């Protein structure tokens, strides 16, 4: 980790001078005095101009991939990642016995490499047991064949490496989006720089899930939207290859995650807004049937066809309701305000996230104070940058388009939450649908900070041009915001931010310290989510290899809670004593046989994220 920080700071010093050197080639809002800065370029001015741009992109890519690879396997996998692992291997959770005491190896069997499995098995198992489209899982199936097993199980490093690489690929892609949107390499570079260190981007890239691939498609689709906007403005036909590319990107996005359709909904809102603007400037309704709009209608039709082919799969899947129960539910009192704070928290964490999730007040309080101070300082600067961009005729429309994507996405989230009873704000990862738009808006604002117009700056006592009221120059403001993102990314990779919902490693340590006798770990089971919870524990037990003959019981529960109670009762009668019974996330009446055991006082034991437990000593 020390070497990582040393390398990171070395890069930081170099890229600042490189960005200054390259900025003269692509100033969107140039300060008339910026030519005086050339003497501070150090040796970068010796590079040919054609080298500076790709070299700087390479720097952002190196920073981004480094952050995404550090501590890649340090955090244990959680239930959703187990779903990725199992289905990507062509395996199924149905092979795990229910209502029986089983050994860890049996529970972990779906995580073993399966040479007989095919892509057809991957697609079939997803269609019948999961609620996601198959594109990413098929790619992961092919990818994980490149990695040997890890202790007889699928390689967690290999599974997480794929989304990490895809997440890093989003850095040059979002550069293209920023550059195309604002016709400015500076905006593109600052957008790529913020994507490289975004704590939210790092969080998604370090999980064996499909969100980084979905982000790539969002970037591609938004790029097409930006190009289409320019053609609508100029009233020129959208090139056929752009239309076909847009349809293809949208089809791939839907085949990666169904929530990609929310991005498409935001694009529809933006296009309606553009049509309204055009009708305001011209009373001719026939404009809506002009060449650029006809091509856009063709894109819409092609995208609808690509989406409709998944409807039968969704309707035939009987598990989709049970798998999404966690985002459904009623609210009372202050619970109605929770979605607002959840959405705001996710927005904040796209830029900055210090260890405010720590269990220690001495860490939480200073972190909260620093974050609050940072946003009190940074938000006015960023809003000023957006305001200035809105005043520029060449960038006003792009700010409106990207802001429209963000605002409409948040509005859709709240419609689902408050009117349909599906709280999308509970899953921070779902915000991938508008995340790239946030980063590009951030890059556009920072471009103003880097080279503020003369009228927007203040001359300090030392002759230093400052931005805002805190006496900090625009370039230093950009550096501080980037550094905050960098340290926030480090917070995530150290599991101090965006902490894992489940900590089976800590739970297994607790069992080792508390139970000298064999153990039975029992939980109620409804879906493979609960199987994944126990897989996490079994995997840690296998890695530790210190418990005596541990057993697991997945007591299935459909609608009758007593079914789990009966399964536990039958199992307890068959096991030889002594043993310790750990009821983990057990949501059913406790069996009568368990009540004959000595109940342990768990209040003196530590809590473990994701695992609510009761302990019984059965003698």
Image: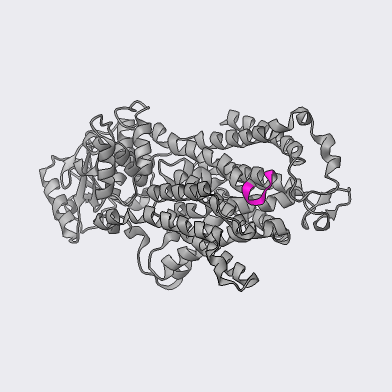
Q: Residue furthest top?
A: 148
Where residue 327 appears, x then y in whole percent?
37, 60
Nearer to us in this view, 356 or 579: 356
Nearer to us in this view, 50 or 614: 50
* Vertical placement of residue 387 versus 531, above or below: below
Please tell me which residue is depicted at 16% across the width and 47% down the height of the picture. Answer: 99
Residue 204: in magenta span:
no
* Image side of residue 464 versus residue 363, left or right: right
Please tell me which residue is depicted at 44% across the width and 68% down the height of the picture. Answer: 415
Where residue 611 appears, x then y in whole percent?
34, 49
Prevailing secondary structure of the magenta residues: helix
Where residue 114 appears, x then y in whole percent?
25, 31
Q: Tell me if residue 483 can be seen.
A: no
Residue 184: in magenta span:
yes
Where residue 111 appears, x then y in whole percent?
29, 36
Q: Quadrant of the C terminus?
A: top left
* Image side of residue 177 versus residue 13, left or right: left
* Vertical placement of residue 602 versus 336, above or below: above
How many numbered circles are shown?
Answer: 0
Q: Quadrant of the N terminus?
A: top right
Q: Tell me if residue 223 can be seen.
A: yes
* Image side of residue 162 versus residue 566, left or right: right
Please tell me which residue is depicted at 57% across the width and 62% down the height of the picture. Answer: 404
Q: Which residues are magenta?
A: 180-185
The colour scheme used to paint the residues is one colour
Quadrant hosting residue 574: top left
* Vertical placement of residue 546 versus 578, above or below: above
């Amino acid at each position: 980790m020390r070497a990582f920080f040393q390398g990171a700071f070395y890069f930081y010093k170099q890229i600042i001078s490189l960005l200054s050197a390259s900025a003269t080639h692509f100033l969107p809002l140039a300060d008339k005095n910026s030519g005086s800065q050339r003497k501070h370029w150090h040796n970068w001015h010796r590079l040919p101009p054609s080298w500076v741009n790709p070299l700087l992109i390479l720097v952002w890519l190196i920073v981004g991939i480094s952050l995404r690879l550090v501590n890649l396997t340090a955090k244990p996998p959680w239930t959703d990642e187990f779903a990725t692992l199992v289905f990507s291997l062509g395996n199924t959770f149905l092979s795990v016995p229910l209502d029986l005491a089983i050994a860890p190896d049996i529970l972990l069997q779906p995580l073993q490499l399966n040479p007989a499995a095919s892509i057809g098995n991957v697609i079939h198992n997803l269609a019948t047991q999961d609620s996601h489209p198959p594109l990413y899982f098929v790619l992961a199936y092919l990818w994980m064949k490149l990695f040997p097993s890890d202790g007889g199980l699928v390689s967690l490093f290999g599974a997480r490496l794929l989304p990490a690489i895809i997440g890093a690929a989003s850095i040059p892609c979002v550069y293209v989006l920023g550059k195309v949107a604002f016709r400015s390499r500076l905006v593109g570079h600052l957008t790529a720089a913020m994507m490289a260190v975004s704590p939210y981007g790092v969080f998604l890239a370090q999980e064996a899930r499909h969100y980084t691939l979905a982000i790539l498609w969002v970037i591609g689709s938004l790029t097409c939207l930006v190009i289409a906007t320019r053609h609508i403005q100029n009233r020129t036909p959208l090139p056929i290859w752009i239309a076909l590319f847009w349809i293809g990107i949208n089809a791939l996005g839907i085949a990666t995650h169904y929530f990609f359709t929310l991005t498409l909904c935001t694009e529809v809102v933006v296009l309606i807004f553009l049509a309204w603007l055009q009708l305001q400037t011209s009373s001719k309704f026939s404009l809506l049937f002009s060449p650029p709009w006809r091509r856009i209608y063709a894109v819409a039709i092609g995208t609808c066809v690509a989406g409709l082919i998944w409807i039968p799969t969704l309707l035939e899947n009987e598990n989709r309701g049970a798998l999404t129960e966690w985002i459904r539910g009623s609210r009372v009192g202050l619970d109605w305000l929770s979605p607002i704070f959840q959405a705001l928290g996710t927005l904040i964490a796209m830029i900055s996230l210090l260890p405010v999730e720590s269990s220690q007040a001495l860490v939480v309080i200073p972190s909260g104070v620093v974050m609050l101070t940072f946003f009190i300082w940074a938000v006015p600067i960023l809003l000023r940058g957006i305001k200035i961009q809105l005043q520029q005729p060449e960038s006003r429309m792009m700010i409106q388009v990207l802001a429209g994507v963000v605002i409409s996405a948040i509005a859709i989230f709240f419609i689902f939450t408050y009117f349909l009873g599906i709280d999308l704000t509970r899953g921070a990862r779902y915000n991938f649908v508008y995340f790239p738009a946030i980063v590009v808006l951030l890059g556009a604002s920072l471009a103003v900070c880097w080279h503020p117009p003369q009228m927007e700056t203040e001359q300090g006592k030392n002759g230093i041009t400052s931005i805002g009221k805190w006496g900090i120059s625009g370039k230093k403001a950009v550096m501080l915001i980037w550094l905050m993102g960098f340290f926030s990314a480090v917070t995530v990779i150290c599991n101090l931010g965006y902490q894992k919902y489940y900590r089976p490693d800590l739970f297994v340590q607790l069992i080792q310290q508390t139970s000298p006798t064999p153990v039975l770990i029992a939980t109620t089971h409804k879906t493979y989510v609960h199987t994944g919870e126990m897989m996490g524990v079994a995997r840690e037990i296998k890695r530790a290899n210190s418990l005596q003959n541990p057993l697991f019981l997945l007591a299935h529960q459909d609608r009758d809670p007593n079914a789990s109670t009966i399964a536990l009762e039958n199992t307890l009668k068959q096991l030889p004593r002594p043993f310790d019974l750990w009821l983990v996330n057990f949501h059913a009446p406790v069996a009568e046989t368990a009540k004959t055991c000595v109940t342990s006082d768990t209040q003196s034991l530590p809590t473990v994220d994701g695992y609510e437990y009761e302990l019984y000593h059965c003698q």
